[in-house]
Amino acid sequence: MSEVKFSKEHEWIILEGDVATIGITQHATEMLGDIVFAELPEKGSNVEKDGTAGVVESTKAASDVYTPVSGEVVDINQAIVDDPSKINEDPEGAAWFFKLKMKDISELDSLMNKEEYDRFAKESSS
Amino acid sequence: MEIKKTSLNKLHQDSQAKFVEFAGYEMPIQYSKGVIEEHKFTRSHAGIFDVSHMGQLFIYGNENLTSDLEKIFPLDLKNLQQNCSKYSFLMNEEAGIYDDLIITKLEDGYLIILNAACKEKDFEILSNILSKKYKMELSNDRALVAIQGPKAVEILNETINGVKNLTFMTGDWFDYNGQKLFVTRSGYTGEDGFEVSILNDLAEEFTKSLIKKGAELIGLGARDTLRLEAGLCLYGHELDLNKTPVEANLKWAISKERLSNGGFVGSDKIINQIKEGAKQIRVGIKPEGRLIAREKTKIFNETELPIGEITSGTFGPSINGPIAMGYVDKEFSKIDTKILLEVRGKKHPANICKLPFYKKSYVKGAN
């Protein structure tokens, strides 16, 4: 398993073989507040790096979820659609969003590591 | 322009509030527990809301003032008893709404609670119509603190003895640390509760005393989900200059006595609309599933013709599902009418439903 990487749109991604699991960060859920709705991409669809691949809504507003890499959606986490409050409980674990079969693994190179992301998140929220 | 702060700002900060700018004020949108927990706490215990940004307008005068105010508000103020409150509107000649408000008759005049974003303009409109005949004070030295929820009466009565004897939409002056407070049994959450008008200097200590007795600070985020579940209008969303009280389905707030003779600003339009019926009307809307339809979402009938627009939409924590209010063409306003909501380019099914979404529990008096 590779190290967890992070995007500027507050997604995390981890690669196993050529399948990447993607979700939103703890920091993102703290900014959003209580999440009450989640929409995920369709299984079998193709998504492009930095394109929208879902929506989350808090009591206050809707936010797009972007995919940090391109690929085919091979699995989605139906549990967070059925109970979106799970996203606030464990965003960087059980509440992953979708799994992609990656086309180009080098797309991961431009993403941040944990330390870089933590600094980015701190700066962007202050 | 510099952002304004209420006298409870420091207490909000100390309580880990997340702030937003609202009507020129730095206000808490939520605290560390978050909107859903704060909402549920208000429904099960007692929530404290800093609503000091709202306008507290005192107008002093006697019977002449009552007659003059009847030329403005569609209320039977002559027969309103002292210390009783009414919900009303400030309108233009076309019955478009400048603001919605609560007016209370005092011994020496009236107290009007105005929306924060509208209060300066309201003051100007009112002082022009009243042509400066009466002393008018848009208070700068008073905070307004609401306590709402089933435990509100018990908690507040421990701090201000006697408030438990007030009934819904009445108020009175009470003593607190040698100062006078004006307390009304009212609020905007669908719960029993009170609003306390208190001098700025005493507000923090007073609020802390409520917290000590088990009430908790609640932000504007939960205030919005609470009022929407209770089917209550929010100015700038359900109400504005392009809407009339008839269209807003607020006919109940217009005094029947005044409808027969009119004589208030906007009365011709209102009497005519009641006779002819309004083209569009405010309704409650429940999207199917978990979909949230926000403000400005387009509403269609089953054959996909546009029939209206959402004015507020969110997730209702006590309903545990999405809720909304909006305006639709009159013929589609019946309960259980199937409609479609266009969200992110797709049309989703929803139903017109009864308001409120959440049943209120007010303590009603004789009047």
Image (spheres, helix red, strand yellow):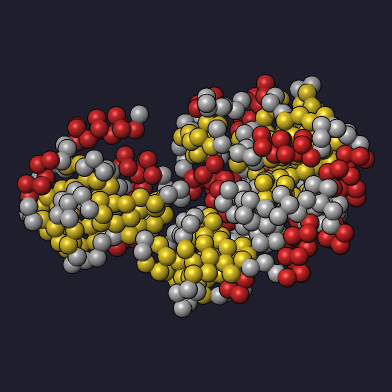
Quadrant for residue B113, please give it.
Answer: top right
Quadrant for residue B60, please give it.
Answer: top right
Spot the residue most to the bottom. B303
Residue placed most toward the observer, B206 or B350: B350
**Image position of B294 (left or right of B360):** left
Residue in view at x 89 percent, y 44 percent: B67
**Image position of A22 (left or right of A38):** left
**Image position of B218 (left or right of B171):** left
Please say whether residue B252 is visible from this viewpoint: no
Residue placed most toward the observer, A47 or B331: B331
Give coordinates of residue B164: x percent, y percent: 78, 42
Residue in view at x 57 percent, y 45 percent: B223
Give coordinates of residue A68: x percent, y percent: 19, 48
Image height of B276 relative to B55, above or below: below
Quadrant for residue B117, please give it.
Answer: top right
Quarter of the image that includes the C terminus of chain B: bottom right
Image height of B3 relative to B90, above or below: above
Residue in view at x 37 percent, y 67 percent: B346
Give coordinates of residue A16: x percent, y percent: 10, 52
Give coordinates of residue B193: x percent, y percent: 69, 45
Residue in view at x 35 percent, y 29 percent: A126
Spot the residue most to the right. B63
Q: How many marks?
A: 0
Image height of B76 relative to A78, above or below: above
Please say whether residue B128 is visible from this viewpoint: yes
